[in-house]
Amino acid sequence: SHVVNARRTDAQSYLLEQANLLERQYAAQGRYPDSFTLKTSDFYSYSYTRSAADQFVLQAQPTARQSDSRCGAMTLTQTGAKTPATAGCWRD
């Protein structure tokens, strides 16, 4: 469980870093990009979705090698909203 938790924390850190990059782009251009390239990982599949010029969702979906049944997929939006809301899934 320690390995799963450590990988989850790494994925969260990556989502937060990417959200910061997106915020810098928004400040410079007044909108989030239409597409945004994210790294690949053996443990999480990352995705970016822009639903409007001022809205995005970043997602980290665990792969078969992560098998995180407690928390599952994690998302982060431009407002800082995080899912899942399950206690202990996101480290603040």
Image (cartoon, helix red, strand yellow):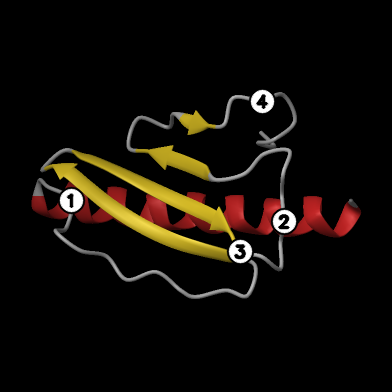
**Hey, which quadrant is residue 52 in on the image?**
top left
**In the rendered structure, which disc, 4 or 1, sits on the residue that comes first in sequence?**
1
Please, is residue 12 above or below residue 65 in the view?
above
Q: Which mark is residue 32?
A: 1
- The residue that mark 3 highlights is 63
Q: Nearer the viewer, mark 4 or mark 1?
A: 4
Q: Residues within 10 Å of mark 3 (few under 14, many from 20)?
A: some
Please, is residue 47 above or below residue 32 in the view?
below
Tell me residue 25's x, y (percent). 22, 56
Q: Secondary structure at mark 3?
A: loop
- The residue that mark 2 highlights is 67
**Hey, which quadrant is residue 76 in on the image?**
top left
**In the rendered structure, which disc, 4 or 2, sits on the residue that comes first in sequence?**
2
Residue type at the position of mark 4: Thr
Q: In this image, 83 relative to 1: left or right?
A: left
Q: CA distance from mark 4 to mark 2?
A: 16 Å
Q: Residues within 10 Å of mark 1 (few under 14, many from 20)?
A: many
Tell me residue 64's x, y (percent). 66, 65
> Is 33 in front, or is 75?
75
Q: In this image, 3 relative to 14: left or right?
A: right
**In the rendered structure, which disc, 3 or 1, sits on the residue that comes first in sequence?**
1
Residue type at the position of mark 2: Ser
Identity of the residue drawn at 66% across and 33% down: 92
> Is 53 in front, or is 17?
53
Residue type at the position of mark 1: Tyr
Q: Which mark is residue 86?
A: 4
